[in-house]
């Protein structure tokens, strides 16, 4: 484990990322995906990152999710310099503070809905009794309480995405990172997922959504367009209940 | 990750992918079943085989007798010597006997014969079987009965086609009742008469104390050790001057060589099966890590540490190997029980328990060894590469 790091969140932000850069080595010349991206997220805030394919949206999300190490810049999560942590401490951080919703609604295909939601709790060392309560609560939040024992590979696309959302919620994370969470859903299902996110954000969780869809982005408090590896100025789109920093 | 969760999740995973694993499970189970059966009943089979060998070569019998030297008084085995030999490790039976010439009258004929004064163990040691009547047992020896057993050749000479059982014969002016006829292929022994050793000591003239012993070892593997130990055991109770310890070494060596090769090939077959099982575990676990790359990435994104992933795949490999070993042990137990029925002997429980411990230890080591590399590979995967794996 790393030694305790100095904390930095003077405005009470959940995420403070400064001048993040990401360069992939390539034989013909390095590919610079992110060129000094700075982003912040506050409790209860919903933030959308938009941009064309290959603009670096997912890379930014993976860096913020501690799944990828940037080649430059700094990143404080709830005031902690998480880039200075070792692999184990970063895993701990992912399990306790972050929730992921992947673009491809990745579920453990040979497992039931219950088992899919149980894994994050197992890794967090939650007792079996509390696990059951939390799983039921998370599934109720996405209206899937009746699908508890269903096999993941027998769910519809919308149900799969809601299970993925419930799985991201089950550990009660401070931040949810969602990569195209509505990309494979129809209009109605997509907005249902956003309803769930809004409900979660109202309870103080910060949410970052990567999306192509302007309608989905419009439901967030701020939108960051990402072009050529740079974030453009964020514009507040709707009244939010962002907690005071 | 808690131990109970780890085991539960791993057992569930192996069970759900059982079709992928059945070949490996079968290989390990067969290897363990073969190993258990050979070890547990191998000794019983060997013992039975030894008894059968007695009929053709006496490979596990040791004969003890004294040289008769002109300037020495005849020697015999003292009771405490015989008792000590019976207590010697790996000795299963000892028979004491002596031979002396006598004239026997019966059925209207008088013949010079060799009288074998034997104890009741003699028949079992030599595997002599009655052709008619019975071969006297411990009771006759203890009660010093005037019973005798005739060799088949002698019985024919004395009584022709008549049934000799129940007839009387006379030796040294004493009458003995014929209780049985022993079936023998050896001509000279077939012309002999057998008396209980105690009766002979009471009634025959001359020296009738036992000057010969037959010692049977449990298996041929122990013959050499017992033959080496015998002079020491005898010397502790009497002089060993003129003692001869005689073993059919040629037959023993041939039997040992054949048995060694048989055992070697059985162990080799079991070992190869287990080795194949180990390679199978390596192979299926490597394939499992490859095919479950996205799952690994997903679990890491959920907060699994490298150690959690390592522990999960390693436990799956152990569940596979130890589970297959348990199946093999169950099959082996069944085979041992069947073989026990066939041999008419109870399998040795302590040997089976030893096999159980050894098989589980080998299976554990195999699962650990074969599963370690794929598990390490899984644990070291980068999350993003794993989640994007197609």
Image (tube, coloured by chain):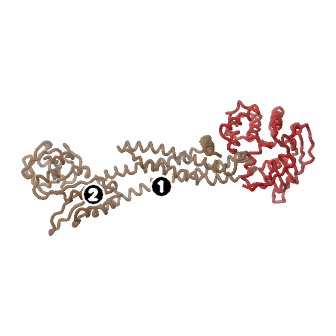
Chain colours: A red, B brown
Task: Identify which residue is drawn at 55% across, 52% down.
Answer: B366
Relative depth, front residue between A238 and B388? A238
Instruction: Point out which mark residue A202 bears.
Output: none
State which tag comes first along the sequence, 1 or 2.
2
Residue labelled with disc 1 = B268
In the picture, measured across the screen, residue A99 lies left or right of residue B355, that is right
**Mark 2, chain letter?**
B
x, y percentage for residue B263? 42, 55
Mark 1 surroundings within 10 Å by alpha-carbon count, few (fewer than 14), some (14 through 19), many (20 or more): few
Relative depth, front residue between B216 and A29? B216
Visible residue check, residue A209: no
The image shows residue A109, relative to residue B220, as above or below, that is above
The image shows residue B200, relative to residue B250, as above or below, that is above
Please check whether the numbered discs 1 and 2 fall on a single chain. yes
In the picture, measured across the screen, residue A80 lies left or right of residue B85, that is right
Instruction: Point out which mark residue B85 bears.
Output: 2
Task: Identify which residue is drawn at 56% across, 46% down.
Answer: B23
Mark 1 vs mark 2, foreground winner is 2
Relative depth, front residue between B27 and A3? A3
Q: Quadrant of residue B19?
A: top right
Distance from Cα at disc 1 to Cα at disc 2: 37 Å
Visible residue check, residue A29: yes
Relative depth, front residue between A206 and B171? A206
Q: Are marks 1 and 2 in contact (CB under 8 Å)?
A: no
Q: Residue furthest bottom?
A: B71
SS at circle 1? helix
SS at circle 2? helix
x, y percentage for residue B107? 9, 46
x, y percentage for residue A145? 72, 31
**Mark 1, chain letter?**
B
Mark 2 surroundings within 10 Å by alpha-carbon count, few (fewer than 14), some (14 through 19), many (20 or more): many
In the picture, measured across the screen, residue A57 lies left or right of residue B107, that is right
């Amino acid at each position: 484990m790393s030694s305790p790091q100095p904390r930095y969140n003077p405005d009470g932000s959940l995420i403070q990322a400064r001048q993040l850069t990401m360069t992939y080595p390539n034989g013909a010349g390095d590919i610079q995906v992110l060129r000094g991206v700075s982003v912040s997220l506050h409790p209860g805030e919903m933030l959308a990152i938009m941009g064309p394919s290959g603009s670096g949206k997912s890379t930014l999300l993976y860096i913020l999710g501690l799944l990828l190490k940037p080649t430059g810049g700094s990143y404080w999560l709830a005031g902690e310099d998480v880039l200075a942590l070792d692999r184990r401490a970063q895993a701990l951080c992912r399990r306790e503070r972050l929730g992921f919703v992947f673009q491809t609604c990745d579920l453990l295909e040979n497992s039931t809905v219950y088992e899919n939601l149980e894994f994050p709790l197992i890794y967090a060392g939650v007792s079996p009794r509390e696990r059951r309560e939390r799983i039921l609560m998370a599934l109720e939040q996405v209206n899937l309480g009746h699908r508890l024992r269903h096999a993941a590979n027998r769910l519809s696309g919308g149900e799969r995405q809601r299970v993925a959302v419930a799985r991201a919620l089950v550990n009660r994370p401070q931040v949810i990172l969602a990569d195209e969470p509505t990309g494979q859903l129809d209009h109605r299902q997509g907005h249902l997922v956003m309803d769930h996110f809004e409900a979660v954000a109202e309870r103080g969780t910060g949410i970052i959504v990567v999306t192509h869809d302007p309608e989905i982005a419009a439901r967030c408090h701020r939108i960051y367009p990402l072009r050529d590896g740079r974030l453009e100025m964020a514009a507040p789109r709707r009244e939010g209940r962002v907690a005071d920093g | 990750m808690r131990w109970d969760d780890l085991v539960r999740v791993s057992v569930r995973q192996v069970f759900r992918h059982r079709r992928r694993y059945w070949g490996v499970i079968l290989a390990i189970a067969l290897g363990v079943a073969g190993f258990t059966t050979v070890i547990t009943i191998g000794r019983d089979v060997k013992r039975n085989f030894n008894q059968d060998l007695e009929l053709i070569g006496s490979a596990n019998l040791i004969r003890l007798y004294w040289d008769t030297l002109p300037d020495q008084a005849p020697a015999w085995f003292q009771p405490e010597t015989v008792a000590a030999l019976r207590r010697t490790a790996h000795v299963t039976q000892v028979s004491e006997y002596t031979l002396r010439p006598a004239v026997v009258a019966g059925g209207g004929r008088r013949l010079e014969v060799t009288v074998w004064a034997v104890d009741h163990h003699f028949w079992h040691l030599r595997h002599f079987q009655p052709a008619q009547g019975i071969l006297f047992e411990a009771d006759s020896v203890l009660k010093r009965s005037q019973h005798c057993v005739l060799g088949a050749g002698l019985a024919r000479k004395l009584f022709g086609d008549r049934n000799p059982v129940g007839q009387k014969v006379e030796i040294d002016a004493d009458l003995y009742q014929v209780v049985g006829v022993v079936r023998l292929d050896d001509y000279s022994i077939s012309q002999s008469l057998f008396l209980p050793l105690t009766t002979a000591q009471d009634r025959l003239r001359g020296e009738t104390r036992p000057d010969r012993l037959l010692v049977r070892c449990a298996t041929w593997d122990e013959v050499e050790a017992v033959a080496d130990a015998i002079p020491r055991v005898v010397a502790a109770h009497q002089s060993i001057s003129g003692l001869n310890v005689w073993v059919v070494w040629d037959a023993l060596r041939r039997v040992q060589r054949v048995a060694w090769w048989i055992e070697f090939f059985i162990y080799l077959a079991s070992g190869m099966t287990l080795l194949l099982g180990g390679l199978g575990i390596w192979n299926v676990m490597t394939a499992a890590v490859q095919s479950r790359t996205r799952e690994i990435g997903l679990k890491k994104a959920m907060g699994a540490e490298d150690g959690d992933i390592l522990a999960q795949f390693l436990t799956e490999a152990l569940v596979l190997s130890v589970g297959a070993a348990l199946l093999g042990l169950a099959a082996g137990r069944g085979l041992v029980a069947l073989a026990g029925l066939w041999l008419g002997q109870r399998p040795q429980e302590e040997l089976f328990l030893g096999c159980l411990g050894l098989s589980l230890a080998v299976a554990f080591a195999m699962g650990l060894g074969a599963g370690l590399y794929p598990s390490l590979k899984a644990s070291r995967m980068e999350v993003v590469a794993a989640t994007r794996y197609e």
